[in-house]
Amino acid sequence: MLRSWLTAGLLVFLSGALTFSAVAAESDWPYWIGPRQDSSSPDLDLPDEWNLAGGEGSNLLWAAETGSRSTPVIRGNRLYLLTRNSSEDPQKAGEKVVCFDATTGALLWEHPLQLFLPDVPAENIGWSSVTCDPVTGHVYAQGTSGDFCCLNGQTGELIWNKSLQEDFGLQPVRTGPGSAPLVQDGSVIVNGVMLGWGDQAKPNHRFLALDKQNGLPVWSEGTRPLPEQQISGVPVLGIVNGELQMVCNASDGGIHALQPRTGKRLWSYYLPEQGQTSTPLIFAGRVYCGHSIDDGHGSVTGQIVCIDATNTGDVTSTGTIWKKSGYPLQRSAPVLIEGRLYFVDDTGRLCCLNANTGDEIGAPIQLDKSLPSNLLSADGKLYVNSTNGTGYVLKPTPQGAESLFQFQFPEGEQCHGSPVAAGGRIYMATTGHLYCLSKPGARPEPQPLPRLERETHIALDEHPALVQPVPADIVMTSGTRLRYQIRLYNRIGQYLRSAHPDEVTFDVQGPGTVDIAGRYTITTAQQQPDVAQVAVTYRDFTGTARVRIIPSLDWSFNFDDGRIPATWVACAYRHAVIDADLLATLRQEDPLAGNLYVVMTSEFAKHGVKADFDNAAPHQRLRHLLDFLPVAEDAPLPKTVEDYREQFNASLERLVQERVLASYVWNTAESDGSTEPRLVVIQGNRGIAKNGVLCQSSVESDAVSSQSWLGPSSLRDYTIQSDVMIHSHSGKFPNAGLIGQRYALNLIGNQQQLRLGTGSPQPDRLSAKVPFEARPDVWYTMKLKVTTPGETASPQPDRLSAKVEGKIWPKDEPEPEAWSVMAEDLAPQLTGSPGLFGNVTDGELFYDHLTVTRNPAP
């Protein structure tokens, strides 16, 4: 017992969870929102005002010509920042982590992040923030494309990396900054909307913990499925009644608390899904968080809420301590100073409320209207910057706040990140420069901070209450073996020890077996992709781990069995298997029935055996069905239930006859204060007769563009090939494509073009295109081959490159010898999963006879 107590006590002492700075200098800033995760710094003698001219008497210590939308982080004498890699060589355009000497501004090292097929606007690249591990000094960075890496903080050397998009289905955030990784004990935690594989194939804002030493998944926990929007949450840590909680906002409109070591959900508080929620603040058993709704027409509403974090479960109706409307807040995180809550709302007002009651203190101070950055609370002052290049220094007072200084960054420079303080200096990144400022001759010494509430000592509860097999999610191939580490935790999520295999029992659902030593094995006979779940039971507690089994190349897929492989990532929700023969018959005899067959089969794949079509925001599925009506553009559209019945019932009856539908019912539903028609359909029992094809269709605006991944991100030097058909709407065409090793071969329908490259928004990095006349409802064969490394045409023959080649031809014709389009990438993607690309804004896509094969050895 003594040894167990000492070991456990040492683990708790080494954890930064006790005070969030137990192993880091008080004046470090290792995380986006500060060392205590509350936007505050203990630094003193910080400047009240400054100018950026430099020279004698100036507050400017140094400025680096490195622009960024990110927030810098500091550990020791090193500053780390994520920024765009805007090299003169367009093939190197992307993102990078840069490291500066925090005292002199000297650039020490930089590390590029892999940017591939980013489905986001160019201005959003390089916007998330990196995180330092206070214990090891490692730096963790998450790129726009989901390239997540662990770097040596001293040298910039890559320790490990994961592809969150290819392996877990993380969806890039199209608007606003990305999330900041959170380091806690032995894990680093990331989050976002993910379309995974198997039982996690539907959109869900998930939290994923990776072992910080090797990147292996430790746990994963989701929120409410099918969120209406997509945001980046930034988690924060706090101790409530002796228990460590991780609290974060999510895309489902909820604020969620979890045990950061285990992923166990503690409580959830739900706000309207249509809005966005700010980063929460934890203090004294309470959580403060803002919420904002923008109707898109200039009207913004919102509220700030104080939540009792001591409860469990859904606390939406029971956990409100106070809630105040009239404060739209989705950007700036609130800060707490002497019982007063300060925040800048989305209209640019600095507001102050009584933290206990929510009552307003003083009148709000109108600042710039665009201030997405956090407040910095330090040395009795508040610092905040705007996207328009205006900076403010304010003094908090018992009556609210008063303005001390206002200044302007150089013309054209915007500020999207937050100011931070470390080592007696203030650091700010704009789109043009990175600035370091301090008082001339200042001798800052951090003030002693009040001790935060401590976590309950582990010696008070050494009884296992949760079992955790690690890795929790892994890819294996035929003929491989894995030994799980079985971790045991107590009731409040504190690590106790690892269990020995003879203390637990294993149960495998799916392929593979576990021997007496606890080794899970996939035999060489397993030559088809499959999934397995390994359950581990210790006494009365069971934990599970998922396994994605993917044989070595070569692969061949058709869809005649009506199924999409469960191992494919981000595919099952956006695609469905269609009977090609039935579709051809319906489109010849009843075109509307053919279109409805595609749409409803896709809806069943997304939502289950029942699908509702109404005009509720934001998807308005019923109005989308009108796009398929074969009527003139100026013809009156149906408005009443009777109108819809007249237009659709004959085709719906045909689908019932074909057993695509079991039944359908027209009724009414409330939408925006009025009564609207509503269609409810139930799936029939028709399967695939003999000729199944994969189809992508959409009645939801958030699923028109997609990328799906068929295998592990570690593959290289292969060829992917598939038959492809496009179906047009109103003379417009969708885009269909293949992905190989992070390069895309796309048939751009409306431009009648075949394009090869790394994708928008960086078309100049690698792009080649040729005209191609694609006809609707005609099958073509597409082929994409990537070879790395290869000889380059550059003056540096030892430089790695990738040779990318693509071709397309009518399926019923012989394959042409020549490639249709080719490119050489001098900054190559060396690995990547094969996949599918589609954009169904203007029609549906169909795939069949898909193969992935090794390239012949040179």
Image (tube, grey):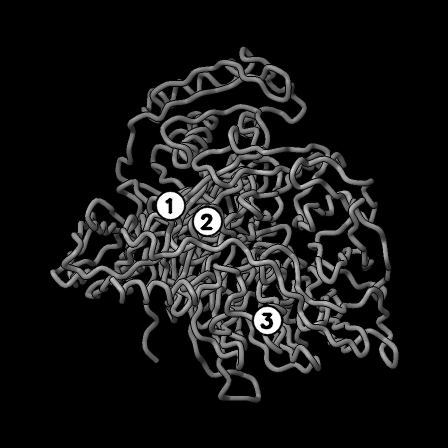
Secondary element at tag 1: helix
Q: Are marks 1 and 2 in contact (CB under 8 Å)?
A: yes
Q: Residue drawn 74% across and 76% down? A: 443
Let me know if residue 752 appears in the view.
yes
Label 1 environment density (alpha carbons within 10 Å; few <14, some 14–19, many ≥20): many
Q: Residue drawn 11% across and 60% down? A: 516
Q: Quadrant of the N terminus?
A: bottom left
Question: Is 746 located above or below residue 656 in the figure?
Answer: below
Q: Residue drawn 75% across and 34% down? A: 299
Residue 194 circle label: 2
Residue matched to label 3: 96
Alpha carbon separation for disc pair 1 and 2: 8 Å
Label 2 environment density (alpha carbons within 10 Å; few <14, some 14–19, many ≥20): many
Q: Are marks 1 and 3 in contact (CB under 8 Å)?
A: no
Residue 200 circle label: 1
Q: Quadrant of the C terminus?
A: bottom left
- Counting from the top left corner in percent of width and height, residue 39 is at 65, 57
- Counting from the top left corner in percent of width and height, residue 765 is at 60, 69
Judge by depth and name the residue closer to the eye, 629 or 151. Answer: 151
Q: Earlier in the sequence, mark 1 or mark 2?
A: 2
Question: Is 370 located above or below residue 602 in the figure?
Answer: below
Secondary element at tag 3: strand
Q: In the figure, is residue 187 to the left or right of 854?
A: right
Judge by depth and name the residue closer to the eye, 333 or 715. Answer: 333
Alpha carbon separation for disc pair 1 and 3: 31 Å
Q: Amino acid at mark 3?
A: Lys
Q: Quadrant of residue 410?
A: bottom right
Q: Earlier in the sequence, mark 1 or mark 3?
A: 3
